[in-house]
Image (cartoon, helix red, strand yellow):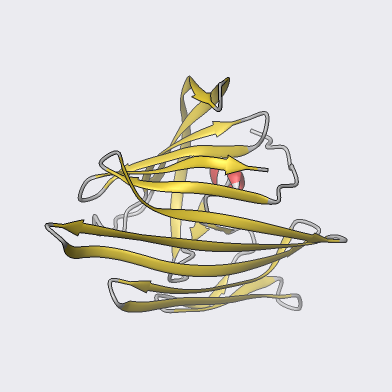
């Protein structure tokens, strides 16, 4: 699968749990010459009987030059626990150097940051957690063709299954259903189950 590269200014996604919108994950793009900066802001809260049981408040920044990742930095408050990632590309070693809350060390440059704006997540065998810096092995399989209504238009999508290929605790495993518009190279929807049915759903892009 060869994904096309399209220049976007923003991608906005709703975060849903059990079909209820509980927050957002929005990406903003800045293009200067051959450099692209991507900023993400993600925030949502799960409450049951007015008691907060799960929450995320995260922001991150990716910098690319000629489509190659130069740096990534994120800070996240997950259930009042701080997580972070600081990644830089070391040109001499031709590797990523990661200082994260779950991993410190080197990483192959074929790794992709696990953010939903980047459809290349469907082409890689390993991804880097945007919250903690951990590296996870994965496999992606095409499962179906689908069609949805988006702003009054019929959009044909490809559906994929992304899963972990290593033995991990259930709360660390990758297990996502992903819907991609192959013509636009944009992810329209991501679904998974973990203490309920979760979905990242495309709201708007330009």
Viewer-proximal residue, 125 or 10? 10
Residue appearing at x 61%, y 46% in the figure? 120
Q: Quadrant of the C terminus?
A: top right
Vertical arrangement, residue 47 with respect to residue 20, above or below? below
Residue appearing at x 19%, y 63% in the figure? 53
Viewer-proximal residue, 78 or 16? 16
**At which x and y percent is residue 135?**
46, 64
Vertical arrangement, residue 151 with respect to residue 11, above or below? above
Q: Residue furthest left?
A: 49
Residue 77 relative to residue 160: left or right: left
Residue appearing at x 48%, y 55% in the figure? 25
Q: In which quarter of the image is the N terminus?
A: top right
**At which x and y percent is residue 139?**
45, 43
Which quarter of the picture shows residue 16?
top left
Q: Residue furthest right?
A: 33
Vertical arrangement, residue 106 with respect to residue 24, above or below? below
**At which x and y percent is residue 94?**
71, 71
Viewer-proximal residue, 22 or 91? 22
Viewer-proximal residue, 11 or 96? 11
Which quarter of the picture shows residue 107?
bottom right
Disc tally is 0
Residue 83 relative to residue 36: left or right: left
Residue 81 relative to residue 134: left or right: left
**At which x and y percent is residue 11?**
60, 48
Residue 18 relative to residue 165: left or right: left
Residue appearing at x 47%, y 70% in the figure? 133
Which quarter of the picture shows residue 86?
bottom right
């Amino acid at each position: 699968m060869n994904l096309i590269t399209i220049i976007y200014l923003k991608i906005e996604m709703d975060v849903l749990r059990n079909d209820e919108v509980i927050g957002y994950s929005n990406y903003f793009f800045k293009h200067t010459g051959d450099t692209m900066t991507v900023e993400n802001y993600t925030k949502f809260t799960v409450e049951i009987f007015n008691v907060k049981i799960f929450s995320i408040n995260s922001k991150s920044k990716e910098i690319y030059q000629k489509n190659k990742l130069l740096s990534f930095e994120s800070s996240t408050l997950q259930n009042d626990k701080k997580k972070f990632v600081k990644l830089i590309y070391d040109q001499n070693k031709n590797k990523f150097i990661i200082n994260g809350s779950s991993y410190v060390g080197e990483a192959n440059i074929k790794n992709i940051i696990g953010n939903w704006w980047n459809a290349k997540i469907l082409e890689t065998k390993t991804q880097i957690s945007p919250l903690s810096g951990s590296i996870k092995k994965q496999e992606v399989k095409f499962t179906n063709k689908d069609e949805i209504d988006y702003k009054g238009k019929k959009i044909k999508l490809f559906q994929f299954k992304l899963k972990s290929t290593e033995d991990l605790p259930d709360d660390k495993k990758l297990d996502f259903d992903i819907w991609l518009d192959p013509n636009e190279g944009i992810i329209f929807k991501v679904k998974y189950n973990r203490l309920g049915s979760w979905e990242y759903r495309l709201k708007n892009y330009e």
